[in-house]
Structure formats: C-alpha cells, structure tokens
Image (cartoon, rainbow, N blue to C red):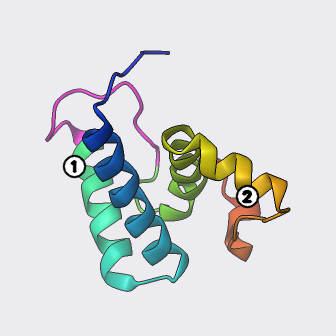
C-alpha cells in the first residue's frame, strides 16, 4: 500500500469532499450518481492517467460506498473511535449487501 502524506488542510478538504459525495449517494441523488459513474468511467479508460484499480462496471456506483466510508475513517480516526464508543452504526443501503467491490 502506498503512503500518502497530506497537510491538515488537504485532509480536511478530502474528508469534506468524501462526506458530501457519500451523503448524496446514500440519498440516491441522481446528479451525484451520474457524476460518480461518469468520473469512474473516465478514470477507468485513462482520461486522468493510468490507474492501478479499474472496476469492471463503472455504472455500479454502490460498489464505491464502502471504500468511501473506509477513507473517511482513515482521514478522521477520532470520529470513528467516538462513533464506536457511542455505538453509532453507519447507514447502509439495502443494495449494498449484494455489491462487492469489483
């Protein structure tokens, strides 16, 4: 796994962007779904450079939800720890149980 060093400001905006996208996807906002699938397609075909991971079906936006949660947990470990202490559970869509990362 590669190590990525971020400034506090970069960590903040990364978590901010991820939380916005994740919340809108969990609300099934069609515009955000369209944005995510379009960018995933562009990443897969190399529009933004060669990527190590390329999903089989870029239209399967459900597959990106858990990795987003995982990234948020890495960017904000204190929040994750406090959530666990209070017994908070993340929100999952019913469709997620059938959507492994491709």
**Secondary element type, mark 1:** helix
> How dense is the environment of label 1, judged by Cα within 10 Å: few (below 14), some, or many (20 and up)?
some
The residue identified by callout 2 is 83
Q: What secondary structure prevails in the magenta region?
A: loop
Q: Is residue 19 above or below residue 66?
A: below
Q: Marks 2 and 1: which is nearer the front?
A: 2
Inspect the magenta stretch and tell me whether residue 17 lies in it: no
Whether residue 102 is visible to the viewer of this picture, yes or no, is no
Q: Give residue 43's position: percent from left, percent from top.
A: 26, 43
- Which residue corresponds to the image point at 38% horizontal and 73% vertical from the top-left? 33
Q: Kindly give the residue lying farthest to the top in the view shown.
A: 2
**C-alpha separation, residue under disc 2 versus residue under disc 1:** 35 Å
Measured from the top left, where is residue 47 in percent x and y? 14, 41
Question: Magenta part of the protein: which range?
Answer: 45-56
Image quarter where the C terminus lies is top right
User: Quick one: 2 or 35, which is closer to the camera?
Assistant: 2
Q: Position of residue 77 (x, y in %)?
A: 60, 41
Q: Which mark is residue 42?
A: 1
Q: Is residue 80 left or right of residue 102?
A: right
SS at mark 2 in the image: helix
The residue that appears at 42% across and 31% down in the rendered structure is: 53
């Amino acid at each position: 796994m590669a190590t990525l060093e971020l400034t506090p400001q970069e960590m903040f905006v990364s978590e901010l962007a991820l939380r916005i996208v994740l919340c809108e996807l969990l609300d099934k906002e069609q515009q955000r779904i369209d944005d995510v699938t379009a960018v995933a397609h562009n990443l897969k075909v190399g529009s933004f450079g060669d990527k190590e991971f390329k999903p089989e079906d870029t239209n399967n936006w459900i597959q990106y939800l858990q990795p987003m949660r995982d990234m948020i947990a890495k960017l904000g470990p204190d929040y994750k720890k406090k959530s666990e202490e209070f017994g908070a559970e993340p929100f999952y869509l019913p469709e997620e149980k059938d959507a492994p990362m491709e």
